[in-house]
Image: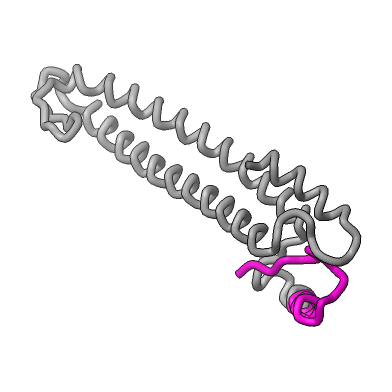
Amino acid sequence: MAANGSSTGSKSSSSAGGKQSGLSAEQVVATFQRMRQEQRSMASKAAELEMDVNEHSLVIETLKEVDPSRKCFRLVGGVLVERTVKEVLPALENNKEKISKIIETINTQMQAKGQELTEYRERYNIRLVGEGEGEAQGQSAANSQDNEGGGSKSGAGVLVS
């Protein structure tokens, strides 16, 4: 979808005046909102996994001080299983490492999504509400006059709330 958007974006920006031949303002805003939502969901998932890592760390620190032959319980797939500390501790450390690697991957993907969002904003001149207060308000007023009055600018800027 991103490849299609970039090819139609170049067509619409190269068209002179009149109507857009590529994406409409609504489609641009919808795509931008979808991309922002994807980034938010990645951030939410990363935060959730960070909490899991913190919980694993607390349990690992607690179990390190306990006798390795002591009985402990572990929740596996919704089932509480009885094990010993020496069996559970390595599994917890392994899970913590895997979760940390997943968090790194999500953060990398989030940075890539952020770069993609920035490029998309620049390509379609998208301004967020409250961004550059006076400047954005002046542009939104000019854009609404152009859109309502049939102005010659096509896709000059999109204001997203």
> Would you say 100 lies left or right of 151 here?
left
Q: Which residues are magenta?
A: 137-161
Q: Is residue 150 above or below residue 20?
A: below
In reply to whether residue 1 is colored magenta, the answer given is no
State the quadrant of the C terminus.
Answer: bottom right
Q: Position of residue 120 (x, y in %)?
A: 71, 51
Q: Is residue 142 above or below residue 93?
A: below
Residue sitting nearer the eye, 112 or 74:
112
State the quadrant of the N terminus.
Answer: top right
Q: Position of residue 67 (x, y in %)?
A: 15, 22
Q: Position of residue 134 (x, y in %)?
A: 76, 78
> Would you say 159 lies left or right of 138 here?
left
Q: Residue at x 34, y 22 (%)?
A: 94
> Would you say 145 lies left or right of 53 here?
right
Q: Residue at x 66, y 50 (%)?
A: 117
Q: Position of residue 127 (x, y in %)?
A: 71, 65
Image quadrant in which you'd find residue 60: top left
Q: Is residue 147 above or below residue 75?
A: below
